Amino acid sequence: MPTLVIFIIFSFSFYVYYKIKYFRSHRPMERRWLSAKSSIALGLFVFFFGLNQFFLHSSIVTYIIGTIFLLIGAGSAWAGYRAYKHYLPLVLEEAKQTAKNGA
């Protein structure tokens, strides 16, 4: 299914983008926040990849592996979202402190 392939490419692209930003950042809370965002993108990549498997092949093994990918991807995206929500106020506070100190 072409739309799933587009979602797979976009989610992997966002994963790479956030990982590059993670390695370029020097602030600790911002790094954790970016790591959470990359975890969401990677989870969505695995989720969409597993969903795409249902449309490519129709065998029992494919359905089992696709279901495992769906569960792992959804779990990773959910954990990343929770971490994102946790670190967002801390990142904003860290940005205020950095702006106040003039760094």
Image: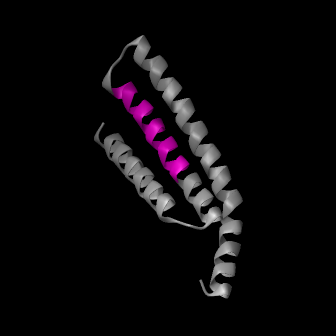
* Nearest to the observer: residue 47 or residue 54: 47
- Vertical placement of residue 91 versus 76, above or below: below
Give the total number of marks visible in the rendering: 0
**Quadrant placement of the N terminus:** top left
Q: Main secondary structure of the magenta part?
A: helix
Does residue 103 appear to the left or right of 41 in the view shown?
right
Residue 4 in the image: state x and y as whole percent: 36, 41
Q: Please identify the residue farthest to the left as the structure is shown.
A: 2
Name the residue: 43% across, 38% down.
48
Q: Is residue 51 magenta?
A: yes
- Vertical placement of residue 61 versus 99, above or below: above
Residue 98 in the image: state x and y as whole percent: 64, 80
Name the residue: 60% across, 37% down.
75
**Quadrant placement of the C terminus:** bottom right
* Nearest to the observer: residue 97 or residue 54: 97
Residue 97 in the image: state x and y as whole percent: 69, 80
Q: Which residues are magenta?
A: 38-55
Q: Quadrant of residue 50?
A: top left
Q: Quadrant of residue 91?
A: bottom right
Name the residue: 67% across, 58% down.
85
Residue 73 in the image: state x and y as whole percent: 53, 36
